[in-house]
Every structure is written in C-alpha cells, then in structure tokens.
Amino acid sequence: MPPIVLTSVPLKYPREGGCVRLLSRLPVGARLCGDQIDDRIPARPHSRLGDHGSFRSHALSVPAYDSHQVVGRCRSHAVGVTALHGCLVTCVADYEMRNIIMRNSHRRSIVAIAALAFGALVTGAVLPVQATAELGPDPAATSKSVAASTAPAFPTFVQLPADQAAHPTATQEWWYVVGHLNAGGHRFGYEVQITNGQTPQALIAITDKTTGEYYTHSQAYSPDQTSFSTTELDARVPSATLSGPMDGMRLHATLPAGTIDLTLNARGPVMYNNGTGLIPFLGGTSYYYSLPSVASQGTLTVNNHTYQVTGESWLDRQWGTWDWSTAQKWTWMAVQLSNGDRVNLWDIFAQGNEHSYATVLHPDGTHEVLAVNPLADTTSAFWTSPTTGKRYGTRWTVKIPALDASLTVVANPQGQEIQSFGGIFEGAASVTGWYRDKRVAGQAYVEQLGDWR
C-alpha cells in the first residue's frame, strides 16, 4: 500500500474576515477526480453550492499558501479533492483508503472547485473538471437539449433553471445573448443585453455580415417600466424581452432599424465559468454561467425586409456585487469552435493588474480553467469610432499554451460599437487556427470595454 498523506486547509468564510484557502501548488496537469467526497460541508443560509446549499463567497482570495507533498493515488490516478470536518482536504488514496473515507459519505463529484479552479490560474496548473460523474453511451450529448431539472455532477454556485430568474438582492445583473444567424447565405450577428439594477437598460445590435452594415440602439428605463420575475426566466423592458424554459426561450427586441424575434433552445452542457459559476470580479464577486450552444431560429427584420433565420447563440448570465470604478479595460470573447469546444475568455485590466484566462467547456461536459497569453501585445487592425473617439482592436491572436492553441480572431465589419457606457465594442467575429495540433474554425463575439490606445 503506498503512503497516504492528507493535507487539510481550514475553510474560512469571507464574511467572517477570512478567505477561501486552497492548495496552490498542484502539479501542472493535475487532474481533479471525485472518487471520495464527504457531504458534511458547513451550511450557511442564502448560499449556492450545488446540493450542499449554503456557501456564498464575496471574495475568492487566492494567496500562495504552501502545502505538503501529496503522495499516492486515487482511483483515476490523479489528485482528488474532498472535504472533511469543515476543511478542504486533498487526498490521494488506494481502494482501502477510499472505503474509509466513503464509509459515511455519498459518492458525489468534486467539491470546493471554486478556490481550486481559480488557483490553477495563479499557479499555471491545468485543472480539468468532470461535469458528469458517470458517462453514458453518449458522453458528448451536444445535440441534446439541456434538461432544466438536471444538475451537474459536481457542486456549483449556480442552480438551474432557478438562476435563470432575477436575483433581487444583486446590485448588478444581466442577461446577455449574442448569436450568429444565416438566412439562405445572408449572414447576420446580433446582440441583446437586458440589465437589471437601479437603472435597467437594453442594448441591442444587428450586424449584417454580408453587407457590412451595423445597427444598434441602447435605452435606459425607470424601474416602473420594467419587470423581472424572481421565479422563472421572464425579463422585460420596453424594447426587449427574454422568457421561457431553457429548451424554449423566446427573445424579442426592437430597434429603429428592425426587430429580432427568436426561439432559443439550449443544447449540450452548461458552462460554469471558473469551473464553479463564481468568479472574483472588479473587487467583488459575480455568479456567472453560460449557455454556449443555443440553437436559434425565427425572424430578423432589417430595413423592412424580414429574413427567416437559423443559427447558434450564446447566453451569458452574471449577477452579484462589484465596483465598476476598479475596471480599466477588458477584452472578452465567446468562442464557438468547430470541434465542439466552447471558450469563455477574459483579458481584464483592473486595480492595476492584468488577468488573462479562459474557461474551456468540452462536449463531454468537462471544464478546464486555463491561462491565456495576454492579448494586448497581439491586438491589431485598430479602428477608431467616429462617434466616441475610442480606439478598438479588431484582430487578435489568442494563445492558450495548455491546449497548444493559436487562434486568429477577426471582427468583421470593424465598426461594431454600441452607444452605451461611453461606447462598447460588441463585435461578431470569425475564428481560424490551430487547437491541439489540429486545424479548427469557428465563430466568436468579442466585447471590448475601454480605450485600447
């Protein structure tokens, strides 16, 4: 029997002045497995940690705490994570040790990934997170609709479909939908963002990829002009609505140049950004998940011409509490690749620091949280807005070393600026390049906040 070492790190709650501590020196390529799990996780009211209920973090701090060497193995021959007696515990064990740990526990998947996944960014480790405890005969399941009542095998801070609804205690919240549509060879991109808060807004745009035309409209509303259901997805402002179950959402938006009227069907696995659905964000925290493979069909009306369209969309959901004054600028990308992988990428400048990372969702539901080479040095083809005077990049080279990925992302047309918050670039883009030693293509939406001079 190999030696067994259990290394425990106390779990402290941020509201009590502590932070989430983690083992920060996992080996590069370490794999998280869910062979052992104890269900005695400390419960706190108003929390979201999968089936365990209650832990809500307001500051995922990731200092580089030293850890003891972990030796041995778990059933999948990888580093395992479990929780015992209110501590985060890394364990590596053989069959006999698993029996001891599991004697009073349920077989679940990974717990406390929130700290560990973001810790991977700090240490450069690659942490695949398995989204399904047992894979059936069709592990990819990318063509299947998301079952609204189905929860992931690993604990997350998001619960679906409940979290499609509004969160009245959140100071910031939005529903953000972008997509790529086709009408018999005529290609479009679109965006509809509905925000909730002190000043609800709708940001709407249509990109005619074929002609190069771009149409946009933004409008703020008083709260008495809007409604946001707290029990189901039903977000309404005068110029846009999003409602319905995950396999039959209805999106309607109007702008002076036309209308967007689509039925959206979420397919395949949900992306829990940062591996857990909770991220540190602008001095606070944000709950965050994506539906990155949404089959879309309906009509698009542009300049009095109505097109029957089909395509694929991406829905982003964020809510929480953060400080906008800490943001300097960022580039964000929603990348849909031809091999079925989905990439949510951030290059964010805030509080004097730059953080570049991606959450990668594979067709079988596994997540990887990976370091990305900073984008600023490879941004090119700059365009200056004649309306706001802001300068934006429209061509990027995205390098993700752990995936041997080098992707060229090109926004076309260049001029895709929404007139809100002083100007935000929201651009439909194409993707080509190499990914795990294979050629790939794809499509993306790119958001740039700030002035990229």
Image: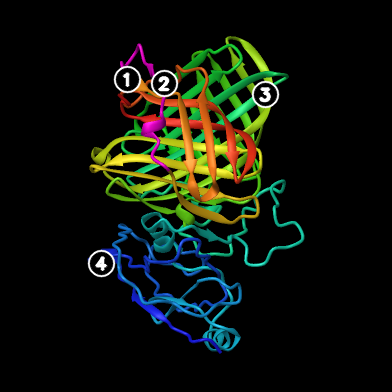
Between the residue at mark 4 and the residue at mark 2, the CA separation in whole angstroms equals: 41 Å
Q: Position of residue 41 (x, y in %)?
A: 43, 75
Q: Does 169 sit above or below residue 28?
A: above
- Identity of the residue drawn at 67% across and 27% down: 298
Q: In what element is the residue under mark 3?
A: strand
Q: Position of residue 420 (x, y in %)?
A: 36, 24
In-image side of 306 versus 350 (left or right): right
Between the residue at mark 1 and the residue at mark 2, the CA separation in whole angstroms equals: 9 Å
Which residues are drawn in magenta? 373-390
* CB under 8 Å between discs 1 and 2: yes
The answer to whether residue 237 shows anywhere in this view is: no
Q: How many marks?
A: 4
64, 39: nearer the viewer:
64
Magenta stretch containing residue 378, yes or no? yes
Q: Which residue is mark 1?
A: 390
* Quadrant position of the N terminus in the picture: bottom right
Q: Which residue is mark 4?
A: 18
The answer to whether residue 80 shows anywhere in this view is: yes
User: Which tag is nearer the camera, tag 1 or tag 2?
Assistant: 1
**Amino acid beneath label 3:** Asn
Q: Which mark is residue 182?
A: 3
In-image side of 351 versus 269 (left or right): left
**Amino acid beneath label 1:** Lys
Q: Which mark is residue 417?
A: 2
* Neighbourhood count class around disc 1 (C-alpha, 10 Å): few under 14, some 14–19, many 20 upward: some
